[in-house]
Amino acid sequence: MLTEKLQIEFIQYLSRLFREGDFSATYKYAFLNALADLCVENKLENNIVISVRALTEKMVELYWEQSRPFSDQNHYLLQNSGRQSAIINRIIEKQSQGYRLGQFKLNANEFGRFISGLIPTIKNGPLWRLQILSEHLIKFLYTPADGHNSIRLNDGIQKCFQIYYDLIISLTRDRWQQKIRSIPSNFDLLGKQGDLENFLFGTKRKSLKKVEELLQELQKGICFYCEKIMRDKVAVDHFIPWSRYPNDLGHNFVLAHDKCNSSKKDYLANSSYLRKWDEYNLNLFRVDIEDSLASYFLCDADRSLAISDWAYANNTAPLWNL
């Protein structure tokens, strides 16, 4: 059973991590973000074991869009106090060959080799350095497993990540931005550009036109929520709100009237909409979504289901209804 004492210790540890950890690059922020994501994407399990490969793949997902030029002059943001981060350079190399992330992941062999090539960087960096506070290794979150190829979360830690996911992501991404802003080589570039947060983490980084076209066809022009013909302005909605889980998953999109989408805001929809989303996107339209969107977005129905289970199980706000 998760105790209040452990929850307090968890928050205190995170506070120390941000305050006393050595962050010369953004790797630790990406690693912590990845760990939090995987804790909510997996079913609750005591002392869950998470592979370094899964953590590395998740970090690549986070860094992929950040590895694009920040300006029209092909200038890239540095994410290391010295030279550019190795992961960023490797991603830039793949992007220069014309790869999109979803398309790249469909080539399982090549993508697997790509991840394998990055694993040593993660092992030698954030994996074991994250828990060094004031030069002391304090293994509060996890310990090594499977010959250092995995980590085993300590008692209650996965549940803490699930409960405090929103807070962890908010703090991590805020510090991530601060780190990028603090690197001298980024000063001039950031001074000329606007929304750093949206560039790093926003869904606007990707065009949702493909999603809109597909859902218009699958939903037959009917709003997902009010079930009326969409003649006016429409909106692609994250069924599990972006504010709850700030990652794009192909099966998480629905098409709605702009008015319905605005009304829903950042709430979870009531159980009748949840059942409908499950029936449509995870069953009836599952293959269509994967066939049409997998080259552009991550399409993993099982992950989408796990995220919905987590979001509804940990929700404390009223459910939205028209």
Image (spheres, helix red, strand yellow):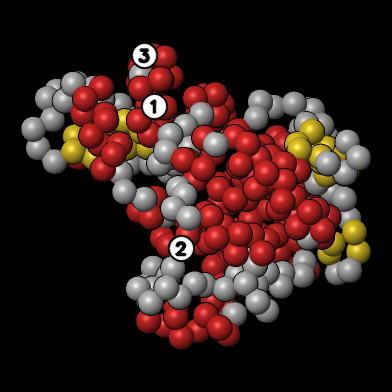
Q: In which quarter of the image is the N terminus?
A: top right
Point 37% across, 81% down: residue: 192
Point 55% across, 52% down: residue: 62
Residue 298: percent from left, percent from top: 48, 37
Q: Which of marks 2 and 1 is nearer the N terminus?
A: 2
Q: In the figure, residue 233 lies in which quadrant?
A: top left
Q: Mark 3 points at which residue?
A: 284
Q: Earlier in the sequence, mark 3 or mark 2?
A: 2
Label 1 crowding class (10 Å Cα cut-off): few <14, some 14-19, many 20+?
few
Q: Which amino acid does the dot numbered 1 rest on?
A: Asp
Q: Name the residue under label 1.
A: 291
Q: In this view, does 72 lie above or below 258?
A: below
Residue 290: percent from left, percent from top: 42, 27
Q: In which quarter of the image is the C terminus?
A: top left
- Give the SS element for disc 2: loop
Disc number for residue 68: 2
Disc number for residue 186: none
- Give the SS element for disc 3: helix
Point 31% across, 48% down: residue: 207
Label 2 crowding class (10 Å Cα cut-off): few <14, some 14-19, many 20+?
many
Residue 165: percent from left, percent from top: 60, 44
Q: In the figure, residue 174 lies in which quadrant?
A: bottom right
Q: Are marks 3 and 2 in contact (CB under 8 Å)?
A: no
Cα distance between the residues tagged 2 and 1: 25 Å
Q: Nearer the viewer, residue 91 or 169?
A: 91
Q: Which amino acid does the dot numbered 2 rest on?
A: Arg
Q: Which of marks 1 and 3 is nearer the N terminus?
A: 3
Q: Nearer the viewer, residue 44 or 218?
A: 218
Point 63% across, 36% down: residue: 109
Q: Which amino acid does the dot numbered 3 rest on?
A: Leu
